[in-house]
Image: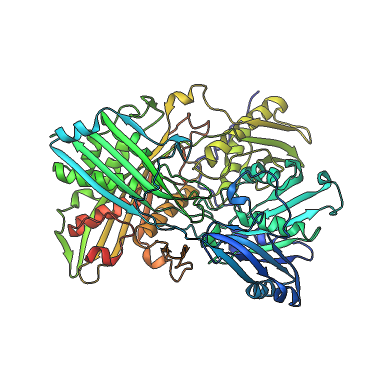
Amino acid sequence: MTIPTRTPQIGQDRVRVDGPLKVTGTAPYAYEQKVENPAYLFPLVSAIALGKVLRMDVRAAEALPGVLKVMTHENAPRLRIKTDPELYILQSAEVQYKGQYIGAVLAESPEVARHAASLVRVDYEQKAHDAHFTPEHPQKVAPKRINGSKPSATQEGDVDAAIAAAPHTLDAVYTTPNEHHNPLEPHPIIAIWHGDAGLSPNAKRLTLHDSNQGPAFTMLLLPPLLGILPTQLEVFSPYVGGSFGTKGSPHSHIVLAALAARMLPGRPVKYNMTRQQMFRTTGFRPESHQRVRLAADAQGHLSAIVHEATAPTARLKQFVEQTATPARMLYAAPNRKTAHFVVPLDIAPATFMRAPGEFTGMFALETAMDELAETCGLDPIEFRIINEPSVDPENGKAWSTRNLVVCLREGAKLFGWKQRQAPGQRSEGEWQYGLGVASTTYPDQHLLNTFARVRFEGGRYKVELQAADIGTGAWTILGQIAADALSVDVNLIDVEIGRSDLPFAMVAGGSMGTYTWGSSIMVAAIKFREKYGLNPPEGAAVRAAGQRPKDFKNYSRHSFGAHFAEVKASRVTGEVRVTRMLGIYAAGKIINPRTANSQLIGGMTMGISAALHEESYLDSRFGHVVNQDFAGYHIAAHADIPDIQARWIEEFDPYFGPTGAKGIGEVGIVSVPAAIGNAIYNATGKRLRDLPFTPGKLLN
């Protein structure tokens, strides 16, 4: 078969196809889906952190005009299989964290529902709770596995002996705070049960209009929980107003709406969270306490790396970030040890937040590397380069591609690294200036095969899969990949995503989207051409799973890069400003420079925000976050963000998939705070080891 030559779409700077809809406000998000005669939900939440509900007086709420139902644990529909403890709500009077759902008001308007909820009176049997995290907590334990099903601890060689014998050592503690995702769009949900309450269970069907990173985990966890078959659940999520991990798996608000809708058969139930409510039940990045020990010989070669991380976890549901895992693979050292510990507390469950584990751990590791470079009398870039491993130190596998050294050297040239002076030497008035650097990396998170379907209808090619566009550009780049694989004009491609009735695909998370979805599209498209040729009949269709080289598991697969930051710090106020930033990446084939640039700049922006501003203050006396809004939880605004540049090197990695692309969604945020902290040290001579870098920490 001869396929005509066309201009390749992969690598082209194409405008986002969903852009006009979004900027004109006509893209229909979950809460804006048109439904007939909806009821509105406002939740009832626990005012205590541990105990049980003794009684709920709902009479005043029920008497309010416009109130339809008040749902509590006493009248809520029964759930079946406990697929996830976080989702198993309203089945008893037990309270396990403050802000837990204990009921809901359903009304004709959101205003009436909210007012009625304020009229419900609740009596509790309160128990003494523990919400105070300390790394020396008596209940501290070592989990068997951590996020990603990785082993909790690893050890090679004798680290203590190596450290004792080394001329240059470092032993330091680094901490990071609780952080909340805060996407622009709060979590919305519309739930509709179809079928009369008197029908058999198999006759019922549940529709969810949700904001998620893909329906995969919802389809896995909800049907057995609700006592229905997967074929009885349909999930729609065409447009998503941001996520950063919080919408990667279902949270209890979805179950709350589904239970409420079951009490109003055939009538939609709508619930859209307030900003404050998002600090209670949709997860967060847990704080961390990390001890890093490094040792190097007289020439600066690392002889030992030790990284131990301790973090809190909810008693209800354990979540342990893979904080120390980058120390297992990033630098060469014959002796290494990593360990993770958790402290169970009476708090809400944590969840994935952009680059979970790697973001937290690389702040500590890359700050420690900078500190030891100073001790060794070496430039921080050269120190990293001389400790570059030839193979993955963790498993001995060859790298699929690893161009970290190229990124460090190229970035140094572009950023003007030679202008860097000794700590505290460059100043203008009250402002001290400095430069900092940090390596960045993020692994291939391939978990399950993704499927895609290509079909021909009405003279156009339909590309269908359960992917989600959370602002990353999936609507655009998937069409580019399909156009090249089919060798047709990209304007003949219609991408269909965001529905559970499409072929199964992994969620948009773990930086997996482009290379897993793209692989399945390429395979399906090639098989489509082989079967139907250049003139397919109406209705022609092919469904296929993504593929990689058979030996892809024999290679260590990671994205790499380097972050460079310039800061100015005030001697008077302690204020720190990032004045410019550069990220340079080795992230495989870039499908669309425009969307890739946006992703990488977005990651660096979020990293600056975490470095200088973000911290959720949990009051352990009561078990809740006190700064649960944008007035108290500051995220970076336009005035906080400087000139940011993203660059990448030419690279193609077939072991991630046939597109040659790697993940870029998270490598852009990993180690940004370390680069900024290292720049602060270069500016002031003061080393900050605790995020965020607020003025008080610098002055003190």
In which quarter of the view is residue 202 placed?
Answer: top right
Residue 312 location in percent, x, y? 42, 51
Spot occupied by residue 69 in the image (x, y as percentages of width and height) = 75, 67
Q: Quadrant of the N terminus?
A: top right
In terms of depth relative to the viewer, which is nearer, 61 or 123?
123
**Which sits in the foreground, 347 or 414?**
347
Q: Is residue 213 visible?
A: no
Instruction: Name above or below for residue 21 compared with residue 59.
Output: above
For the image shown, how many numbered marks are present on the structure?
0
Identify the colour scheme used.
Answer: rainbow
- Left or right placement of residue 243 versus residue 675 in this view: right
Q: Position of residue 449 (x, y in %)?
A: 59, 32
Q: In the image, what residue occupies the spot 35% across and 57% down?
A: 611
Residue at 69% x, 32% y: name it. 543
Q: Residue at x 73, y 37 (%)?
A: 456
Give whichever of 161, 128 is nearer the camera.
128
Residue depicted at x 54% and y 34%? 447
Quarter of image, res 518: top right
Quick one: quadrant of the C terminus? bottom left
Tell me where residue 130 sits by quadrant: bottom left
Q: Is residue 297 left or right of residue 624?
A: left
Rendered view: 552 above or below 188: above
Q: Is 457 situated left or right of 298 in this image?
A: right
- Is 125 located above or below residue 404 in the figure? below
Visible residue check, residue 461: yes
Q: Residue 685: give x, y in percent of width and height.
A: 17, 57
